[in-house]
Protein backbone atom coordinates (compact mmCIF):
# COMPACT_ATOMS: atom_id res chain seq x y z
CA UNK A 1 0.00 0.00 0.00
CA UNK A 2 2.80 2.27 0.77
CA UNK A 3 4.19 1.58 -2.63
CA UNK A 4 0.78 2.17 -4.13
CA UNK A 5 0.45 5.49 -2.31
CA UNK A 6 3.89 6.60 -3.24
CA UNK A 7 3.30 5.63 -6.80
CA UNK A 8 -0.03 7.40 -6.75
CA UNK A 9 1.47 10.47 -5.12
CA UNK A 10 4.38 10.18 -7.51
CA UNK A 11 1.79 9.66 -10.15
CA UNK A 12 0.06 12.76 -8.92
CA UNK A 13 3.15 14.83 -9.26
CA UNK A 14 3.94 12.81 -12.33
CA UNK A 15 0.39 13.55 -13.40
CA UNK A 16 1.14 17.23 -13.05
CA UNK A 17 4.23 16.57 -15.11
CA UNK A 18 1.98 14.54 -17.38
CA UNK A 19 -0.19 17.59 -17.97
CA UNK A 20 2.83 19.56 -19.07
CA UNK A 21 3.90 16.61 -21.18
CA UNK A 22 0.45 16.23 -22.75
CA UNK A 23 0.35 20.00 -23.35
CA UNK A 24 3.72 19.77 -25.08
CA UNK A 25 2.46 16.80 -27.09
CA UNK A 26 -0.71 18.74 -27.98
CA UNK A 27 1.34 21.77 -29.04
CA UNK A 28 3.68 19.54 -31.06
CA UNK A 29 0.65 17.86 -32.68
CA UNK A 30 -0.89 21.27 -33.48
CA UNK A 31 2.42 22.48 -34.91
CA UNK A 32 2.74 19.30 -37.01
CA UNK A 33 -0.86 19.66 -38.22
CA UNK A 34 -0.28 23.35 -39.03
CA UNK A 35 2.92 22.43 -40.88
CA UNK A 36 1.05 19.66 -42.75
CA UNK A 37 -1.78 22.08 -43.68
CA UNK A 38 0.80 24.64 -44.85
CA UNK A 39 2.56 22.01 -46.98
CA UNK A 40 -0.80 20.86 -48.41
CA UNK A 41 -1.68 24.45 -49.23
CA UNK A 42 1.72 24.95 -50.89
CA UNK A 43 1.25 21.70 -52.81
CA UNK A 44 -2.26 22.78 -53.90
CA UNK A 45 -0.87 26.19 -54.94
CA UNK A 46 1.95 24.50 -56.84
CA UNK A 47 -0.52 22.18 -58.62
CA UNK A 48 -2.80 25.13 -59.41
CA UNK A 49 0.16 27.05 -60.88
CA UNK A 50 1.27 24.02 -62.90
CA UNK A 51 -2.29 23.57 -64.23
CA UNK A 52 -2.47 27.26 -65.15
CA UNK A 53 0.94 27.06 -66.85
CA UNK A 54 -0.12 23.91 -68.73
CA UNK A 55 -3.36 25.59 -69.88
CA UNK A 56 -1.44 28.68 -71.03
CA UNK A 57 1.03 26.48 -72.90
CA UNK A 58 -1.84 24.59 -74.57
CA UNK A 59 -3.50 27.90 -75.52
CA UNK A 60 -0.23 29.20 -76.95
CA UNK A 61 0.30 26.00 -78.93
CA UNK A 62 -3.27 26.21 -80.25
CA UNK A 63 -2.77 29.86 -81.24
CA UNK A 64 0.52 29.00 -82.95
CA UNK A 65 -1.14 26.13 -84.83
CA UNK A 66 -4.01 28.41 -85.90
CA UNK A 67 -1.50 31.05 -87.01
CA UNK A 68 0.49 28.47 -89.00
CA UNK A 69 -2.72 27.25 -90.63
CA UNK A 70 -3.71 30.83 -91.48
CA UNK A 71 -0.24 31.52 -92.93
CA UNK A 72 -0.44 28.35 -95.02
CA UNK A 73 -3.89 29.39 -96.27
CA UNK A 74 -2.61 32.86 -97.18
CA UNK A 75 0.42 31.37 -98.96
CA UNK A 76 -1.89 29.02 -100.90
CA UNK A 77 -4.15 31.92 -101.89
CA UNK A 78 -1.14 33.98 -102.94
CA UNK A 79 0.15 31.07 -105.09
CA UNK A 80 -3.28 30.71 -106.70
CA UNK A 81 -3.43 34.44 -107.43
CA UNK A 82 0.06 34.37 -108.95
CA UNK A 83 -0.80 31.33 -111.06
CA UNK A 84 -4.01 33.04 -112.24
CA UNK A 85 -2.09 36.23 -113.08
CA UNK A 86 0.56 34.23 -114.99
CA UNK A 87 -2.19 32.38 -116.92
CA UNK A 88 -3.93 35.66 -117.74
CA UNK A 89 -0.66 37.26 -118.91
CA UNK A 90 0.13 34.20 -121.06
CA UNK A 91 -3.33 34.39 -122.65
CA UNK A 92 -2.91 38.12 -123.29
CA UNK A 93 0.53 37.50 -124.81
CA UNK A 94 -0.87 34.74 -127.02
CA UNK A 95 -3.69 37.07 -128.13
CA UNK A 96 -1.20 39.83 -128.95
CA UNK A 97 0.89 37.34 -130.95
CA UNK A 98 -2.24 36.14 -132.80
CA UNK A 99 -3.19 39.72 -133.61
CA UNK A 100 0.36 40.48 -134.78
CA UNK A 101 0.35 37.38 -136.99
CA UNK A 102 -3.06 38.34 -138.37
CA UNK A 103 -1.86 41.91 -139.04
CA UNK A 104 1.29 40.60 -140.72
CA UNK A 105 -0.79 38.22 -142.82
CA UNK A 106 -3.15 41.07 -143.75
CA UNK A 107 -0.18 43.22 -144.68
CA UNK A 108 1.26 40.44 -146.86
CA UNK A 109 -2.15 39.87 -148.47
CA UNK A 110 -2.50 43.60 -149.17
CA UNK A 111 1.00 43.77 -150.66
CA UNK A 112 0.23 40.74 -152.81
CA UNK A 113 -3.08 42.29 -153.89
CA UNK A 114 -1.37 45.60 -154.60
CA UNK A 115 1.25 43.79 -156.70
CA UNK A 116 -1.53 42.06 -158.62
CA UNK A 117 -3.32 45.36 -159.11
CA UNK A 118 -0.07 46.96 -160.29
CA UNK A 119 0.48 44.05 -162.68
CA UNK A 120 -3.08 44.41 -163.94
CA UNK A 121 -2.64 48.18 -164.29
CA UNK A 122 0.62 47.72 -166.11
CA UNK A 123 -0.97 45.13 -168.38
CA UNK A 124 -3.94 47.39 -169.04
CA UNK A 125 -1.79 50.40 -169.70
CA UNK A 126 0.33 48.48 -172.19
CA UNK A 127 -2.71 47.06 -173.96
CA UNK A 128 -4.38 50.40 -174.30
CA UNK A 129 -1.27 51.82 -175.88
Image (cartoon, grey):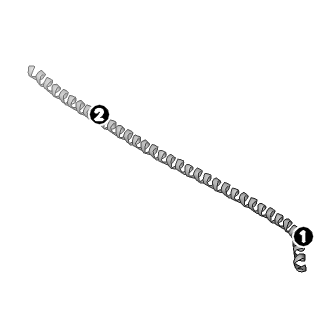
The residue at the point 61 percent across, 51 percent down is 52
Task: Determine whether, in the image, residue 113 is placed left or right of residue 48.
Answer: left
Q: Are marks 2 and 1 in contact (CB under 8 Å)?
A: no
Report x, y in % for residue 33: 74, 61
Report x, y in % for residue 10: 89, 74
* Circle 1 Cα neighbour tier, 10 Å, few/some/many (<14 / 14–19 / ≥20): few
Report x, y in % for residue 14: 88, 71
Task: Determine whether, in the image, residue 83 is placed left or right of residue 12.
Answer: left
The residue at the point 58 percent across, 51 percent down is 55
Indicate which disc residue 68 carries.
Answer: none
Q: 102 and 49: which one is in front?
A: 49
Judged from the image, the secondary structure of the residue bearing numbered disc 2 is helix
User: Can residue 129 be seen from the camera position used here?
Assistant: no
Q: Quadrant of residue 23?
A: bottom right
Relative to 128, residue 94 above or below: below
**Mark 1 highlights which residue?**
13
Q: Marks 2 and 1, how far apart in space? A: 128 Å
The residue at the point 48 percent across, 45 percent down is 71
Relative to 53, residue 118 above or below: above
Amino acid sequence: ELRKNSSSSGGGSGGGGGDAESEAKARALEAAQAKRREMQEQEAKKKKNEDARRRLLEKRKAKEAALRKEEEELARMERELLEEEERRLREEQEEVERQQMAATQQEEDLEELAAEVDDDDWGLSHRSQ
